[in-house]
Image: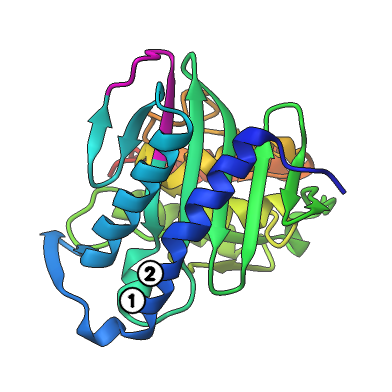
Amino acid sequence: MSMPTALINVMNNAARKASRLLMRDFGEVEQLQVSRKGPGDFVSEADRRTEEILHEELHKARPGFGFLMEEGGVIEGENANERWIIDPIDGTTNFLHGIPHFAISIAVERDKELVAGMVFEPVRDEVFWAERNEGAFLNRRRLRVSERSDMADALLATGIPFARRPGKKAFTAMLTSVMDKTAGVRRQGSAALDLAYVAAGRYEGFWETGLSPWDIAGGIVIVREAGGLVSQIDGRDNILYGDSILASNQRLYDPLRKLLTGAVRDAGIKLTD
């Protein structure tokens, strides 16, 4: 058992305060005011309100930090090398449809490196958190990625490109290849929680294309501190601002990466096709 650091406590307090109104809104989901932000990409009043509370609380605790937020964009801080990366509701479509699988994701980027992350799932009251070199935790329990080494036993998670988003051909090729080799694939609609579940050993791996920094920043730290590996699907390291993500336990990382890249290569397409 480990005691959260001061930075983790700041994130936890902000997330819990924001979640109170968020859970009230979830209970009244049919009456939310919803606007269309883009094809298949909805933003609600709950998104905006949650982000405003997170911004207010985090700024109060660390006034020099900047922000990168899903709704509010970039806000420069006095400390040019430190900023919060926030997704107020990762899994907005689930939220709006009354599906209890969504999370608040918060990360800290310092000198262009991710140093802390939190994924808070308010329905189950599960707080996944990590700080660099301090380990990863679910509430107060230490997390480790799974030890499975046989692809046939692996349960994976992914995200499916929707509406007009690119990557459908590549996804189909990768999914077909993965289905033939693994115990199953899940698509639950929250990249932040998919990463947290890899860290907790619930999944052996996760891959997706076309995500934004706020979708994955918190989860990346948690997976790494739980002993997992994270990169782009082709192995490149610039994950936060790249075009894809692959996270896995160490034993299955190479086989899974080769399986995914081989599927795309054999189909003669790119990850963005």
Query: Is the Cβ of the residue at disc 1 closer than 8 Å to that at disc 2?
Result: yes
Residue 182, image x, y percentages:
67, 62
Q: Could you tell me how far apart the alpha carbons at marks 1 and 2 are, in whole angstroms?
A: 6 Å
Badge 2: residue crowd in 10 Å (few <14, some 14–19, many ≥20): some
- Circle 2: element type: helix
**Residue at the disc numbered 1:** 25
- Give the camera-side residue of 174 and 12: 12
Q: Residue at x 57, y 64 (%)?
A: 179
- Give the camera-side residue of 147 and 15: 15
- Give the camera-side residue of 95 and 47: 47
Would residue 59 appear left or right of 155 to someone viewing this image?
left
Q: Mark 2 is on which residue type?
A: Leu
Q: Which mark is residue 160?
A: none
Residue 203, image x, y percentages:
68, 59
Front position among marks 1 and 2? 2
Q: Quadrant of the C terminus?
A: top left
Main SS of the magenta segment?
A: loop
Residue 169 can be seen in this image: no
Q: Residue at x 75, y 62 (%)?
A: 152
Q: Which mark is residue 21?
A: 2
Magenta region: which residues? 76-85
